[in-house]
Amino acid sequence: MKRTERTYAVNEIFYSLQGEGYYTGAPAVFLRFSGCNRACAFCDTDFSAATPMDADAIARACAAFPSRHLVCTGGEPLLQLDSALLRRLKADGFYVQIETNGSLPVPPEVDWVTCSPKEAPWQVDRIDELKIVYQGQNVETVAALLPSPRLFLQPCSGRNVAETVEYILAHPRWRLSLQTHKLIDIR
Ligand code: SF4
């Protein structure tokens, strides 16, 4: 009997520059999964549309672009991204970065974990960069609960830049992350 290949609900695959955080400016393929397990009031991403694709189809679509830096995002990518798909993508030479809300554990094949923590509880078990959307909350408590070697604060939808800069100047282990793709009007 023929084995049925698992499909993933893909929202979109596109090529652009990473706009935020540590890899700002890096050409990257973006693989956006459909669906999320949080409902943040400030969410600016429409991740509802879904096209079912198997691992081969996803890898082929991603490999059509020149960069081998892949950003898996959402929604929440870890609701779907599993070791089988990661191994298929890495067979094509991809360096895999994920952008996660911190709610789920990370498969070992992921190369770089960007955690932008939203509502607890959190199960993320390793973080390469913590990128917090700053809204005046106690970010030191979050950073203590979610240890990371790199700490970024990002204004909330660009509205509170002055407040974010002021906090970083007073707490210099943090770095500023801007949504640069919005500043230069690219995807
Ligand atoms: S976790 Fe991220 S994608 Fe999900 S609702 Fe919140 S901001 Fe949107």
Image (cartoon, rainbow, N blue to C red):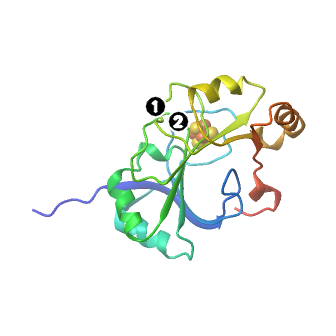
Query: Residue 20, position in %: x, y?
Result: 70, 52
Query: Residue 153, position in %: x, y?
Result: 74, 39
187 in relation to 98, above or below? below
Which residue, given by chain and number where applicable, does mark 1 sit on? 123
What secondary structure is marked by label 2? loop
Residue at the left extreme of this rendering: 1
Query: Residue 51, position in %: x, y?
Result: 45, 58
Q: Estimate the spatial distance between the alpha carbons at disc 1 and disc 2, rounded to whole Å.
A: 6 Å
Kindly identify which numbered label has been placed on residue 102: 2
Q: Nearer the viewer, residue 86 or 73?
A: 86
The residue at 49%/69% (across/down) is 62
Quarter of the picture holding the N terminus: bottom left
The residue at 75%/51% (across/down) is 179
CB within 8 Å, label 1 to label 2: yes
Classify the position of ligand 1 by quadrant: top left, top right, bottom left or bottom right: top right
Q: On the picture, is 5 further left or further right than 92?
A: left
Cβ at disc 2 under 8 Å from ligand 1: no
Quarter of the picture holding the C terminus: bottom right
Query: Residue 34, position in %: x, y?
Result: 49, 49
